[in-house]
């Protein structure tokens, strides 16, 4: 299957990330949308986690992401498992490493370092005193398995800075690249969910030692706008990985009754078009977040390979 580039500018090559883990587990009947979210599969269906990693690798992903988005105390405590977050993070890292060993040694692993309360909610970001020690332990548990740290779905500059500081503390003198990815509002464009500008967020992340800056879990259009706004203002690689949702309600939580509707207009073809437009704006890293399945990553990978023939 081939897709038409939305822009004839053949920019720098794209490093291809994987796609969703949590929503993919739901599609395969191995998780639910509430409670433990994707962490439950580490206990009840670890083979499904392994299979998803392998499917993304076979689809062309060059970097896969550990299933640690919900191995955090605030989610795990719902099942009385808060004290096991380091153990489950190590298990997720080990499964990702198994997938790489099973398929191809050149595939890299990124450690997902997520918000410690709810996604998209800058008003619920935990204090540095609460979150910093958890981030240090979470990152420490993942160090043996990963090639990158991905502090993702950061809704504010403060949240990103606490997360970065925790990972850097865990690493000490070890040299592992740390990437930061911010989640955005749909309107106005160019803002984090905190209302802070993407330009300021990228500048602060660069000052704090991030080695790439991305935008995730928002629409392809918002990511494209943000990449265009910052690409010529930073020396860092930039990129993004969109979700397949319509706009997220501002007071959404994993366990409340608010529903995030799927964006049915985002399919494999439009995903590829969005990636190519984003590349033309300066992106060098691209992949998928919630709702983006292996078929989307495969479509983008096939398109990129066709360009190089």
Image (spheres, rainbow, N blue to C red):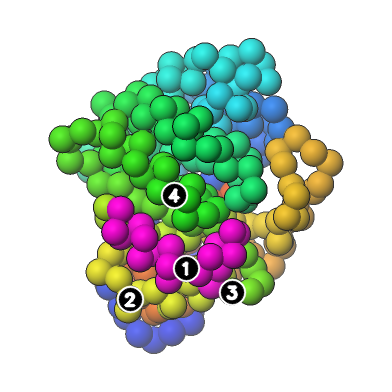
- Say if residue 102 shows up in the picture: no
147 horizontally vs 160: left or right: left
Rendered residue at 72%/42% (across/down): 253
Q: Which residue occupies the foreground of this view, 48 or 262?
A: 262
Q: CA distance from mark 3 to mark 4?
A: 19 Å
Could you tell me which secondary element the residue under label 3 belongs to?
A: loop
Magenta run includes residue 195: yes
Q: Which residue occupies the foreground of this view, 31 or 104?
A: 31
Q: CA distance from mark 1 to mark 4?
A: 12 Å
Rendered residue at 26%/26% (across/down): 144
Residue indicated by mark 1: 198
Residue indicated by mark 4: 160
265 horizontally vs 161: left or right: right
Could you tell me which secondary element the residue under label 2 belongs to?
A: helix
Q: CA distance from mark 2 to mark 1?
A: 11 Å
Q: Quadrant of the C terminus?
A: bottom left
Q: Position of residue 1 (x, y in %)?
A: 49, 66
Q: Is residue 131 above or below residue 86?
A: below
For label 1, the crowd category at 10 Å Cα-Cα, with few meaning under 14, some 14 to 19 and many 20 or more, is: many
For label 2, the crowd category at 10 Å Cα-Cα, with few meaning under 14, some 14 to 19 and many 20 or more, is: few
The numbered disc on residue 189 is: 3
Q: Position of residue 195 (x, y in %)?
A: 59, 65
Magenta run includes residue 48: no
């Amino acid at each position: 299957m081939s897709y038409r580039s939305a822009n004839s500018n053949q920019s720098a090559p794209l490093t291809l990330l994987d796609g969703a883990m949590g929503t993919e587990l739901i599609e395969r009947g191995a998780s639910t949308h509430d409670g433990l979210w994707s962490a439950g599969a580490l206990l009840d269906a670890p083979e499904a986690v392994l299979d998803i990693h392998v499917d993304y690798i076979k689809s062309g992903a060059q970097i896969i992401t550990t299933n640690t988005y919900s191995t955090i105390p605030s989610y795990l405590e719902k099942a009385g498992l808060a004290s096991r977050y380091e153990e489950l993070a190590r298990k997720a890292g080990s499964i990702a490493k198994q997938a790489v060993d099973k398929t191809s040694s050149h595939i890299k692993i990124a450690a997902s370092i997520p918000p410690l309360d709810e996604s998209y909610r800058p008003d619920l970001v935990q204090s540095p005193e609460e979150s910093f020690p958890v981030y240090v332990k979470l990152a420490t548990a993942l160090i043996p398995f990963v090639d990158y740290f991905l502090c993702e779905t950061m809704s504010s500059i403060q949240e990103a800075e606490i997360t970065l500081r925790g990972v850097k503390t865990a690493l000490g003198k070890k040299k592992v690249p740390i990437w930061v990815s911010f989640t955005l509002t749909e309107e106005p464009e160019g803002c984090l969910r905190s209302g802070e500008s993407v330009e300021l967020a990228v500048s602060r992340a660069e000052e704090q030692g991030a080695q790439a800056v991305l935008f995730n879990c928002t629409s392809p259009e918002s990511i494209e706008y943000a990449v265009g706004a910052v690409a010529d203002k930073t020396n860092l690689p930039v990129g993004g990985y969109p979700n397949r949702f319509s706009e997220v309600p501002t007071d959404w939580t994993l366990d409340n009754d608010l529903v995030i509707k799927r964006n049915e207009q985002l399919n494999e073809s439009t995903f590829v078009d969005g990636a190519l437009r984003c590349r033309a704006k300066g992106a060098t890293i691209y992949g998928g977040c919630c709702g983006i399945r292996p078929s989307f990553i495969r479509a983008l990978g096939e398109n990129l390979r066709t360009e190089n023939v």
